[in-house]
Amino acid sequence: IYGKDRIVVAELRKRKKEERKEKILAVALELFEQEGFETTTMEKIAVKADLAVGTLYNYYPSKVDLFFMIIYSESGQYFAELDDIILDQQTSRKGMDTILSFCNIYLDSFSLYSKKVWRELFILSLFGKDNCYKMIGNIDSQFCNKLHVLLLQMQEQGLFSHHIDIEAMVGAIYSILSNNVLFYIIEEDMTKEDMVTKLERQIQVILPTINQ
């Protein structure tokens, strides 16, 4: 195969590979939600995706990697929404509402998948299996970096004192977020609305002097 024909074949192979990846992710998420993360095996995913198990491992080395690829596939929109708030703040000069909106996007990301799946993943992360903790930490680290940019920008706008330690503020807000997410995942009856309401009260306690 020469010239244009070779390019066409290469493009077709690339497209087929991407379509297969998308199918694997869709099948895996369906099984995770239906059967739970622990019960779902790479073998089950391969069967439902009409693939050989070895082929599946060529794409994803473990089901933890597979699940976090599902999350990463959604993260583009997630981070874009955070960036939009940072950009909007440059002209809006909003106060508490901006911080709450920023935090709500973080909380929203945990309501996309069932509590059962998140509980199993957090258990794995506690025992350090399959680099699960590292993968969760990578996404959260990016969130904290963006939160730092937002709060520094708000400080420069005079919305709160220049004596406030921004890094410490980021840590305090992230701790509140993590705590609320943990309770949300553990308590079956806790709704996303309950989590948001609790978050808003706690954020307002640690940032009582923000200039609206």
Image (cartoon, grey):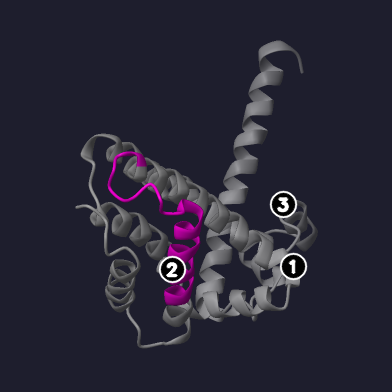
Residue with the most extreme top position: 3
Q: Is residue 122 magenta?
A: no
Image quarter of the N terminus: top right
At x 64%, y 60%, the residue is 135
Where is residue 151? Give x, y as percent: 39, 48
**Relative to 162, does residue 105 appear above or below in the rendering?**
below
Q: Which residue is mark 1?
A: 130
For the residue carrying disc 3, how many other residues have a C-alpha within 10 Å: few (<14), some (14-19), or many (20+)? some
Task: Determine whether the residue tagged by mark 2 lies in a helix, strand or loop.
Answer: helix
Where is residue 124? Give x, y as percent: 67, 76
Q: Which residue is mark 3?
A: 59
- Whichever of labels 2 and 3 marks the residue nearer the N terminus, that label is 3
The kind of residue tagged 2 is Leu
Q: Which residues are magenta?
A: 156-181
Mark 2–mark 3 Cα distance, whole angstroms, equals 33 Å
Q: Main secondary structure of the magenta part?
A: helix
Q: Which residue is mark 2?
A: 177
Q: Is residue 171 magenta?
A: yes
Residue with the most extreme right position: 54
Q: Is residue 24 visible?
A: no
Residue in front for this viewpoint, 169 or 117: 169
